[in-house]
Amino acid sequence: MDLTLARDSRSASGLGADTIPHAFFGMAAEKRNSLVFRKRCSRELVEFTWSEVQARVLHLAVALVRRDLAPGDRVGVIADNGPDWAVADLAIQSAGGVVVPLYSTSSREQIAHILADAGVAFCFAGSPRYLERVLACREDLDPGPDIALLADAATKAPPAASGVYSSSAFLGETPSSRELRDLEARWQALTPDDLSSIIFTSGTTGLPKGVCLSHGNILTNIEGGLRLYQISPDDLMLSILPMSHSFERTMGFYAPLICGAPIHFARSAGTLAKDMLEARPTVAMVVPRFLEKVRQKIEVAFAERQGLSGRISRLALDLRLSATRSRIEGRELSTLRRWAASLALGVIGKKVRERLGGQVRLLIAGGAALSQEVWIFFEAIGIHVLEGYGLTECAPVISCNPPGAVKPGSVGTPLDNLEIKIADDGEILVKGPCVMQGYHNKPDDTALVINREGFLHTGDVGHLDSDGYLYITDRKKDIIVNKAGKNISPQFVENKLTSSPLIDFACVLGDGENYLTAILSPDLESLKSHVKRDGALSMGNDLDLTEPEIVGLFQGAIDRVNASLAPYERVFRFHVVPRPFSIDGGEITSTLKVRRRFIQQKYAGTIALLFKSKAR
């Protein structure tokens, strides 16, 4: 793949560019009238060419310069995934500014903290709803940032407040030739060491910290990632995860942009099934929970299918799962079994893959641990999933399973421009050009995680096998040590629990105790389907989770998990929350990670009762 830019060949990353604007404008000059972005807005499928996006980026960047944006100034962005987010990101950096992404689900306290800590002087809002949220935060700040809408809304004008602009009012007149020349001088003057973005971690244990990433940090991560994932201009990327998430922004946005692959932006989690069918993507970045939900829905659909076709489908799936397990365990299949497994893939594979658009060749999973059973399921139906590992502090990819050489249960091999070593206490240490510059305004915290040799202390515990594949066992701070001194990985047990279709999320507890307990978040859709199918009890529109029959269903799920665990890893008591965990409720982050400390505080009384009585 030729990644040489049309303008010049300077490069610090091997991609033909040393900053993100340099990469974008070079590819825009090459692709011009080719498709770059696509998204369904209401009933209309809106498409943008490279030339159209470049024109929008230039206009918005000039508008920022007109309002005295200086190189290095911080600009916030809060918006739904889509071309507006992408244009704002590229425009800010083209004007020499630093992007500060804001999660659309962040609380007022979190947004105010980020705006203040990063010193955000200006903020883009993707809709009047987001504009009002940032405007509310200005009451807590002195001074607060000016705010502009990214697109004019026909139904609602922005509030008549000082420093608040509609999109058209902010953009102003078309840039002049002189303004465009001055703008080009700005982005041409950027270096790989210049700050590109301050990304605030999602905050599983309190207020987030700002991770400072340079252009060089991000581009070298993309360089290693593209060599591994082999994304090409022939691919079509589906953007699912929030653009404010470093994994999506680096590998789901910048990486395809740099290699010339078009991006289709999903509308929301609720429309994802329709978006997959419409977009027909070849590649997508996903979190494991997305894969688990897809698997559960497919399994429920197979279980509910009646008649001969239903029996054949279930038999075919069982054959594929059995054959896949045998293969990864190194057991040789007989000729007859190989033939039957191949025939089974023809029966179910195409139908299942069509539900994901029919063209998916690669799903890249990160952000949390992927259950081996989930990987086996997708491999069995002919969809390859590559599990990887990363941190925002590493821009973010550290390792990933190579295509065609996956080791289930591992997070693959390190990118070829990174070094990994394991500390004496098992902590994973990382060194390379993608490691962050540091935490914003927190030199002491930076010194704690980056040692004198330049290795980043990840806070994760794991090991490398003889082939160089990395295995994560837990977060260093999350390891449970029970009263008997046994070290227990809560994430390992939680992944086992959430393999049940009844359990959406689980939080396992028991540090310093005699046994483990779990706070469980139910998957109400699967629970209702299960109850209806098995006739466990008569029900109205709502489920009473305290009904003995329903408690029994969850107890059965836990008993099945416990049977596969060591005695000290087993969950003896549990509580099913009446309202499932949610981002708005605070129990999970925007990337669907359990906020363990928050749950411990929110359900402190319940947890105390769970540990009050003796283990069975």
Image (cartoon, grey):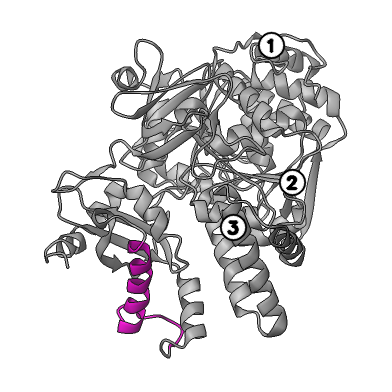
Q: Which of the marked residues, 1 or 3, is nearer the chain's N terminus?
A: 1
Disc assigned to residue 11: 1
Residue with the mark numbered 2: 282
Q: Kindly identify the amino acid type of the residue bearing the numbered disc 2.
A: Thr
Q: Earlier in the sequence, mark 2 or mark 3?
A: 2
x and y percent of residue 201 in the render? 42, 35
Q: Residue at x 74, y 46 (%)?
A: 282
Question: Which tag is nearer the camera, tag 2 or tag 1?
Answer: 2
Which span of residues is magenta-colored?
A: 539-563
Q: Is residue 415 magenta?
A: no
Task: Locate the C terminus and report the quarter of the image it occupies.
Answer: bottom left
Residue 171 seen in render: no
Q: Is residue 7 left or right of residue 582?
A: right
Please state which of residues 492 and 34 is positioned toward the viewer in this rendering.
492
User: In the rendered image, which quarter is residue 536 located in?
Assistant: bottom left
Kind of residue at badge 3: Phe
- Above or below, comparing residue 586 to residue 575 in the picture: above
Any mark on residue 472, and which?
none
Horizontal and vertical percent for residue 324? 61, 55
Residue 282 is left or right of residue 29, and the answer is left
| Element type where label 1 sits in the image | loop
Name the residue: 35% across, 54% down. 493
Amino acid at pointer 1: Ser
Q: How many marks?
A: 3
